[in-house]
Amino acid sequence: MDNRNNPIQCEKISARTFTDSHRRALCACAAFAFGLAYELWAKEEIESLGATPVTKAKTEPVKSDLKTVFLKKLKDPDSDSEKIIAMAEQRHKEGQLSKDALTEIKLAA
């Protein structure tokens, strides 16, 4: 097979054909072993370790998750409900918690 996976005629096979095929096979095996197979298959640019783009990590829960977090904290017998409501109100002011969720948290306290 050539570099485009087309069959090569018997008369045109040489030592160079064998070495090229062998190297392609080794590269494919290494890509599979190191998880780069998708990037090679999709013909995407493979990023080096130093040039990895920085993505913003998800540090804040989603609005619906915030409501469940506050409700779980309220169920804890050792928790201070006033502080939890104050934190929920602050999150509502920042736009991270909906008004309905804030109302539900206040009713649960």
Image (cartoon, rainbow, N blue to C red):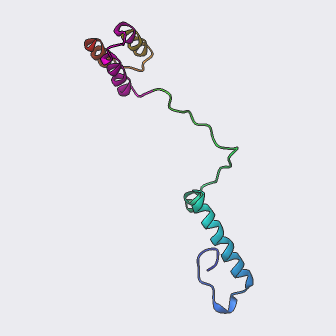
Image coordinates for residue 13, horizontal then vertical, percent: 69, 87
Q: Is residue 108 left or right of residue 39?
A: left
**Range shown magenta:** 61-84
Image coordinates for residue 56, horizontal then vertical, percent: 56, 33
Residue 64 found in image quarter:
top left
Q: Is residue 15 left or right of residue 57?
A: right
Q: Is 72 covered by the magenta stretch? A: yes
Q: Nearer the viewer, residue 69 or 61?
A: 69
Q: Nearer the viewer, residue 26 or 13?
A: 26
Q: Residue furthest top?
A: 82
Quarter of the picture holding the C terminus: top left
Q: Determine the residue positioned at 74% across, 81% down.
A: 16
Q: Is residue 104 visible?
A: yes
In the figure, 29 relative to 22: above or below? above
Q: Residue furthest front?
A: 78
Q: Is 7 covered by the magenta stretch? A: no
Q: Main secondary structure of the magenta part?
A: helix
Q: Residue furthest bottom?
A: 11
Residue 14 found in image quarter:
bottom right
Q: Nearer the viewer, residue 82 or 38?
A: 82
Q: Nearer the viewer, residue 45 or 90?
A: 90
Q: Determine the residue positioned at 59% across, 57% down.
A: 36
Q: Determine the residue positioned at 42% across, 16% down.
A: 91
Residue 53 found in image quarter:
top right
Image coordinates for residue 92, horizontal then vertical, percent: 39, 15
